[in-house]
Amino acid sequence: MDILGWNIPLWLILILLVVIIWYWHATKYFGVFKKYGIPGPRPIPGFGTFIQTMMHPKGVFGLDLDLKKRYKANVIGDPAMIFFDPEAVKQITVKDFNSFTDRRSTGVTEYPVNQMITVLKGDEWRNVRHQVSPTFSGKKLRRMTALINRCAHHLTSNLEEVAKSGDVFECKEYAGAFTMDVIASTCFNIDVNSKNDRNNIFVRMTKRLFNFSIFNPKLIIFLCFPFIVPYLSKLGFSVFDPKCIHFFVDVFDKAVKYRQEHPDESPNDFLNMMLKASESHSDHEADSDEDALPETKHNNQCLRSLSTGEIIGQSLIFFFAGYETTANAVTLTIYNLAVNPDTQEKAYQEIMDIIPEGEDPGYDDLKKLKYLEMCLLETIRMYPPGPQFDRECVADTEVKGIKVPKGMFVIVPVHALNNDPEVWPNPEQFDPERFTEEAKKSRHPFQYIPFGIGPRVCIGQRLAIIEAKVALVHVLRSFKVLRCDKTQVPIKLMKIRAEAVNGVWLKLEKRE
Ligand code: HEM
């Protein structure tokens, strides 16, 4: 092409155009921070603070707090807006939820990942959330407690062998097998002992799905350049391992068809509950649920039954969201109790006082285990499995005097809120007493939000707490968990995941 007398090849012009569009897209909000005097590090176009996160010795578990300290501000531009003030978080997640309904777009268009509740937006999200929320009600979870206990028996019998051998063991391997068993049985009524049954195709595919490095180029593109992902999807690019996705879609698809053809065989699992919801959206079993999840406000006209694609998408996200998060919470609670033997003894005594000997803990017993819950809550304060979550602003909104323009991404820094030394003295110290009723009342309720908050709060929050408590009851009453030479204290976490870099190595002593 001839431009001002220069003969420039067309391909070069196309590349330049792509670079200019990308640069414009990646920097379009930088000026907003200057205009409103919002401080923050100089972001690298496209990468945001990804590189700073990777360079920071503690990754996301240190950078946000350092930024707050460095800029002495309650909001930072990085190039998303990070709000450290719990009142601002309340406004974003609850009061002005309609302006911040959606998560940041991932650009994923491939089926059925694009049907998962985590990526759905606006009315599509409202509809799915409204249909799926009742499947996690207290009444339904009560029925599932027996299934969870069955999985905990697999866990203790696997640990029994470790205790007998006297060897050290890597705790996440066992906790991960437990949470995988729980998902397989609560979602699909499959009884699997993942730790023993390593060749089970379910186990192999789930492990493969989670076995990614953050230096994986696909993940970097997904995190830093989401706006090009839809175009790459059209060219067959897939962020997830396509073999795993095909495997799960096939399994879920067959399960849905089988259940539709055999309505009499209806186990009490999530899949069946979603199928019921898909038959009639108004047919949710009435549930007097004392601690129900927040209701989503919806436009009745947008309410419709779940499609098969949506059911498959939700089955997939229950796997993604439920496996790692809860496995890390259980592992790190056991770690904290192993390195704090007095606290472990107190939790053990509580279990012995409340749960009748030789019996499985029931739903109501679990609620009474207040001290055990304090240990769990304190662990996920220190090491939140979701260290940040985000929202996309869909309408210009003023948050605590700061104008947030439409299209801006907003980050809620869960870890920084849970570890701010001005609110939590000695935040690196494990202290379950921070969660007594009095201590909780003395803090802003939005200062501790490891499961998110508001209408988009973690849908599996109560399942996760029940699951973790069941595992802890079975483990602690059967064994004394001890630190060993291989236990790393203090623990070093991965840069963006609440998972120990070198694993959590411990020892067991059988209790009489
Ligand atoms: C310790 C365990 C867990 C932690 C710390 C955790 C944390 C979170 C967080 C921080 C969010 C984002 C909330 C927001 O944006 O406001 C979330 C969302 C979600 N979680 Fe969890 N989670 C856990 C376990 C589970 C389990 C067991 C399941 C399901 C079976 C689950 C399913 C989901 C789903 C589906 C969403 C998206 C909700 C929506 O977009 O409407 N999570 N979780």
Image: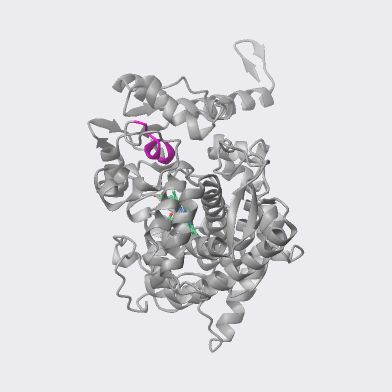
**Colouring scheme applied when the structure was drawn:** one colour
Image location (x, y in percent) of residue 15: 63, 26
| Numbered marks: total | 0
Q: Nearer the viewer, residue 264 or 141?
A: 141
Q: Is residue 335 left or right of residue 507?
A: left
Q: Is residue 52 above or below residue 174?
A: above
- Can see residue 110? no
Foreground of the two, 270 or 172: 172
| Front residue (pair 117, 412) | 412
16 versus 448 height, above or below:
above
Report the side of 81 relative to 204 (left or right): left
Residue drawn at x 46%, y 19% is: 42
Q: Position of residue 390 (x, y in %)?
A: 42, 42
Looking at this rendering, what residue extends furthest in the right direction? Answer: 199
Q: Position of residue 131 (x, y in %)?
A: 40, 68
Q: Is residue 36 left or right of residue 476?
A: left
Is residue 258 rendered magenta in the image? no
The residue that appears at 63% across and 57% down in the rendered structure is 509
* In magenta stretch: residue 417: yes
Provide the residue span drawn in magenta: 414-421
Q: Which quarter of the figure has residue 175?
A: bottom right
Q: Residue at x 52, y 46 (%)?
A: 336
Q: Quadrant of residue 100?
A: top left
Spot occupied by residue 225 in the image (x, y as percentages of width and height) = 56, 35
**Most distant residue in the top direction:** 5
Front-most of 393 and 7?
Answer: 393
